[in-house]
Image (cartoon, rainbow, N blue to C red):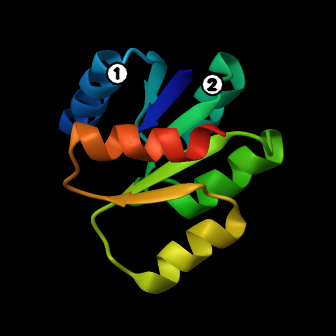
Amino acid sequence: MKFLIVDDSKIARKRLNSYLNELNYVVLGEAIDGLDAIDKFKSLKPSYITLDLEIPKLNGIDTAKKLFEIDPNVKIILITSILDKKEIINAYRIGIKKVITKPFSIEKLKESIEEIKG
């Protein structure tokens, strides 16, 4: 399983990278904003993305919409510290497979990945 990590926080990217490596997944790259995510997605072609909701240039929802236009089969885990039910419902409505809230453990990440693998 190959991942692209999208988060504007260097600390969050580093933690996700560490978690995914520990779980024996491949991290193809990291992006710091929505436009960077789209560019890296096109060039790296990951099958899974961890995507922060609050990122510059395009928020997580708008970024996900663009990613789904490129590849409707990409699996996205949206990561957020905002517990806005409307945003979460919208995330699932557009095709995001899983939403997890910060802070989260490696166990929660593993469980989320297992849920969307199928």
Residue 46 disc label: 2
> Could you tell me which residue is drawn at 49 percent across and 39 percent down?
114
Please state which of residues 5 and 111 is positioned toward the viewer in this rendering.
111
Where disc 1 sits, the SS reads loop
Q: Give the number of the mark in front: 2 or 1.
A: 1
Q: Within the image, what quadrant is residue 35 found in?
A: top right
Please state which of residues 27 and 53 is positioned toward the viewer in this rendering.
27
- Whether residue 79 appears in this view of the structure is yes
The residue indicated by pointer 1 is: 23
> Could you tell me which residue is drawn at 72 percent across and 51 percent down?
66
Q: Image height check: is 41 above or below 29?
A: below
Picture coordinates of residue 9, whole percent (x, y): 25, 42
Please state which of residues 58 and 47 is positioned toward the viewer in this rendering.
47
Q: Is residue 47 left or right of residue 49?
A: right
Tell me the kind of residue under disc 1: Leu
Farthest residue, direction bottom: 86
> Could you tell me which residue is drawn at 35 percent across and 25 percent down?
20
Are the residues flagged by discs 2 and 1 in contact, CB closer than 8 Å?
Answer: no
Q: Residues within 10 Å of mark 1 (few under 14, many from 20)?
A: few
Q: Image height check: is 81 above or below 13?
A: below
Residue 114 disc label: none
Picture coordinates of residue 16, whole percent (x, y): 30, 32
> Could you tell me which residue is drawn at 81 percent across and 48 percent down?
69
Q: Within the image, what quadrant is residue 41 found in?
A: top right
Picture coordinates of residue 76, whole percent (x, y): 57, 46
Tell me the kind of residue under disc 2: Pro
Q: Residues within 10 Å of mark 2 (few under 14, many from 20)?
A: many
Q: Earlier in the sequence, mark 2 or mark 1?
A: 1
Picture coordinates of residue 84, whole percent (x, y): 39, 81
Where disc 2 sits, the SS reads loop
Q: Is residue 74 left or right of residue 31?
A: right
